[in-house]
Amino acid sequence: MKYILISILAITLTACGGGQKDTGFDTDTEELSAEPVKATSPVDQSDTIRIVALGANMTEMKYDTKSIKVPAGKEITIALVNESTDATMPHNIVFIQEGSANDVGQGGVTFKDNGYVNPEDNNVIAHSPLVQIGETAYFTFTTPSAGDYEFICSYPGHWGMMNGKFVTE
């Protein structure tokens, strides 16, 4: 009986978000994943913004997060989790200057070895490596000055659907 009560308590705390600390990050999440992060994090996960790439095909692909709001000039860590289910769905996340999604997406097409991101593109603030299905990538960067920015998946053909707003204050 003691073990049953402990199990119920653990499930309840997990379901209610018990033990999570406020990181100061604000994300607008459309759909939360129940799957755990599949890789060991090199950083304290309580300070990590977790973004999940979802979808079984080109019409379903999306990030679970449509907007991220963080302090300007702050070092942040992103965990990009690829929970897509189709083999043609590797993803990355690229933080970019507002209004440059098409240029960054098209400009990265020939840079397969760099995760479809042109390393010379001044519109790129930071980016993850390309993440295969079932994998998680972590990367850390310092947020730019206060303003409105965007994030996209620059894998060919994805940036039109896989995008969101990135705001620093």
Image (cartoon, rainbow, N blue to C red):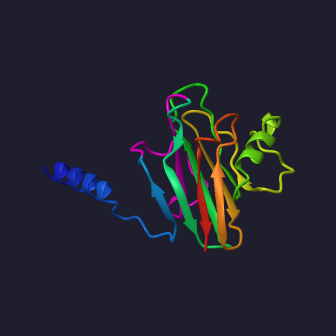
Q: Position of residue 37 (x, y in %)?
A: 49, 46
Q: Is residue 46 magenta?
A: yes
Question: Is 83 on the left or on the right of 91, as rendered?
Answer: left
Q: Residue at x 52, y 53 (%)?
A: 66
Q: Which residues are magenta?
A: 33-57
**Nearer-the-camera pick, 162 or 5:** 162
Reply yes or no: does residue 49 show up in magenta.
Answer: yes
The residue located at (70%, 42%) in the rendering is 154
Give percent across and percent down for residue 88. 61, 26
Q: Residue at x 64, y 53 (%)?
A: 151
Q: Nearer the viewer, residue 108 or 126?
A: 108
Horizontally, is 156 left or right of 39 in the view? right
Q: Residue furthest left?
A: 1
Relative height, residue 82 to residue 45 (above, below): above
Give the main secondary structure of the magenta stretch.
Answer: loop
Q: Position of residue 10 (x, y in %)?
A: 28, 54
Q: Quadrant of residue 110?
A: top right
Which residue of the protein is positioned furthest toward the right in this rendering? 120
Q: Position of residue 152 (x, y in %)?
A: 64, 48
Q: Is residue 65 left or right of residue 159?
A: left
Please name the residue shown 77% across and 40% down the image.
106
Q: Quadrant of the C terminus?
A: bottom right
- In this rendering, the answer to whether 167 lies above or below 136 is below
